[in-house]
Amino acid sequence: MDKPVEKVFSYIDAHQDEYIELLKSFCAQPSVSAQNLGMKEMAQTVQNTLNGLGIKTEYLPTDGYPIIYGELPQGRGRTLTFYNHYDVQPPEPLELWESPPFEPTIKDGRIYARGVADNKGSFLSRVCAVDAYQKVCGDLPVNVKFITEGEEEVGSPHLDSFRVNYPDKLKTDGIVWEGGSKDINRGPLQVTLGYKGLCYLELRCRGANTDVHSANAAIVPSPAWRLINALGTMKNERDEITVDHYLDCLIPPTGQDMAYLQNLTFDEEATKKSLGIPAFINGLTGIPLKEKWLYQPTLNIAGFETGYTGKGDKTVLPCCAMCKMDLRLVPGQDAEQAYRLVRAHLDRRGYTDIEVVKLSGKNPFRTDNDSRLVKASLKNAEEIYGMPPSVYRSSPGTTAMGTFCGPTGIPAVSFGIDHAESNIHAPNENIYLEDFINGIKMTAAVMHDFGADD
Amino acid sequence: MDKPVEKVFSYIDAHQDEYIELLKSFCAQPSVSAQNLGMKEMAQTVQNTLNGLGIKTEYLPTDGYPIIYGELPQGRGRTLTFYNHYDVQPPEPLELWESPPFEPTIKDGRIYARGVADNKGSFLSRVCAVDAYQKVCGDLPVNVKFITEGEEEVGSPHLDSFRVNYPDKLKTDGIVWEGGSKDINRGPLQVTLGYKGLCYLELRCRGANTDVHSANAAIVPSPAWRLINALGTMKNERDEITVDHYLDCLIPPTGQDMAYLQNLTFDEEATKKSLGIPAFINGLTGIPLKEKWLYQPTLNIAGFETGYTGKGDKTVLPCCAMCKMDLRLVPGQDAEQAYRLVRAHLDRRGYTDIEVVKLSGKNPFRTDNDSRLVKASLKNAEEIYGMPPSVYRSSPGTTAMGTFCGPTGIPAVSFGIDHAESNIHAPNENIYLEDFINGIKMTAAVMHDFGADD
């Protein structure tokens, strides 16, 4: 390993308490974009933190929450951009948290808080890497840009406008994206080269103009039953999506895509045990399980609500029913097309009265496998974590990478600080402190190699 | 009309303000059995009110809420029992009430409050009739008994124990049951001679031990989809119940049952307009509509909840899903049998993991059409309301009448003070003040005729 990087690593080790305190302060500030909670304060904290590194920042308003943009040019060499977001998922259901979601709590080597994994820990691993590298070496090995948005958890609706309106700010040689888990055994680092897309829909069905006494259920139409019957036409009990023409346009995985699955670590038994499930869907295991996970689309019910759901009996015929669905998309699909296929499927069956609202959409993306950034990432992942990385050619999750990098083809990779039991988007979100410190080192080392002369 | 009854009617007219104030005070006291809200205070108020009539009351504890029993013997003649309940449905959703549910509000001749129709107005029409008859005539024409329970809205789980444990208190020549609407045109009084039964179920399906990031929806089982697919096997899009063997045991309506439908007033156009629906289920109209309404069982979804249902997107795979169902039962069915058929239907399809909890059950019932009580009720309904009553041989709603009167065969009728737009079990529950006053007169007149010499 290069001498300067070793010194940076030593500095990071010596200052880890300071970096962990910074992480705690970020997680103590709520920033729930879906609920407009603490967003202004969080944006200001991000800007102040970047300013503290000597980065020249700009507060770029959108119709939603601002993007905090920053750059630190070195006057020469390559440019590396860090994409992150400062918003987090809603913390509900609150009663399942073992410590309050916005009171960061350290226990058994882990830190628990909403957003600590997704993605305040990831963002600060970039920030702390820049800080440590500067403190040790003075200059950075690359020109650095930071793009930190506040709407990732609600579908990044204004990131595309940023791309279109600020072409100069987008100019870069590579992007390090947020995210990246270790597997359930905390073995190799996961390095991700692409993501599924996402189409988020809300389906609404209405009946009478008020809830009705259920004695009338024999004659008054039920929107709850209607929505359930409509959903029943969209997926069968074998988890096969049956929306008309939905699977027609899928691009099947290549031989190379399938080869990646062979080396992908995935401890099925440990994952099942951790989740408390007896089997995966359809009892899948091995390569077919990984293939479905990474390369097949989903049609998930994220929420469904109708009528009375409190304690005891209420004999009511509810007047409306609502379902939230998120659809993960693979190459060949796009978010607008997915929405249109669902709409047409319902219309064809007479469900024209069921309203379908597209709340957000992101397209799937895969980066160039042979880029300098991919090579620098895979090499350092192996050196720092002591074993070859687990390469995700196409992560089952979603980022705005497709919308953002797709049109320009900028190489992008993800590596991060969370792990398979980080409970992202769920109660008791957490990361290991050790992973946070290694994430800082990984970022510093990739900056160094990416900027080095050939 | 008999002279004494005319004097009682005059007394009721002269004291209507006093009776309406009493109604307001009852409705201002919350008494939500499903939420254990205000139940103790309400039971005490009922007891005090009956005591005030000179009735000897007893507070009979149960494992749930007490039954307030009272009797006022005259030393001779027939006995008439008034069954009512002092609990009400939960007021939710609160945001749809135009005035607070527990602040009785008079507007355009109606009084709005949770429970004013179901059934505090009905209960007080019996109380005020006894009061007026006593004030005018001294003695009552019948021995009177009051059975007032606090668990009707949660399925009357202890009413059957009362029946078994207190056979003497149950001895009577007839029961006037709660309830009874005018139709949407507020035409004839509805007199009811029987009710559907009810089986209230809660279905629960569990998956992983915590909510999971929806990126894993391709491989982690979804209890929401599983419950929806299971429900999809229980009813089809034509509203036909498809639970195995569910319809096998139904006793079809007799010629007499069908004849009642001819004279039953039901303004289809006004009802559709009031509910804001373009058509009834399957576009039914006329006799087939009334037949389905009164004589067919239902399988209603009263509530369904899973995952995130707040504002915006949350990309989560929920770990559990819950559905509340109420099943209205017709002669030939019973509540325990309905539960067992649903359980067996799910088991037969492999849904053994879906928990089915029977929250309450009541059997269907029809009373003897030729009893003295039926005749006294039909005669006075015609005289007081100025037109022949609308006879419901089998109401689409449910009471504990089946459990209570079925084993002994005591004649029972329902007549009451609400109307088709009373919004029973729904926001903005209301009755007309005029109907309340007529309900007092009707009760007094039926007491008089029921007690008269042949």
Image (cartoon, coloured by chain):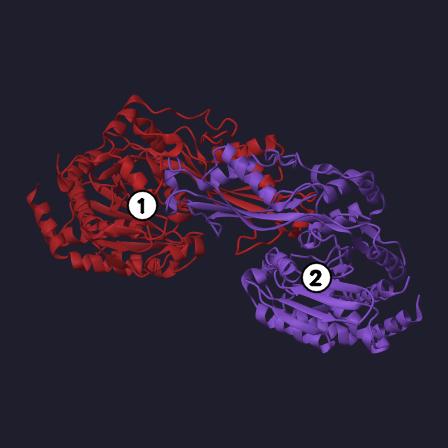
Chain colours: A red, B purple
Q: Quadrant of residue A288?
A: top left
Residue most extreme to the top? A255
Q: Position of residue B34 (x, y in %)?
A: 56, 60
Residue B183 in sight:
no
| Residue type at the position of mark 1 | Lys
The structure residue drawn at horizontal position 38% and vertical position 51%, both measured from the top left corner, is A89
Report the residue marked by disc 1.
A169
Q: Position of residue A389 (x, y in %)?
A: 20, 36
| Residue type at the position of mark 2 | Leu
Q: Position of residue B265 (x, y in %)?
A: 82, 49
**B202 relative position to A265: left or right:** right
Report the residue marked by disc 2.
B170
Q: Position of residue B319 (x, y in %)?
A: 41, 45
For label 1, the SS is helix
- Distance from disc 1 to disc 2, alpha carbons, whole Å, reads 85 Å
Q: B278 or A212, which is in the foreground?
A: A212
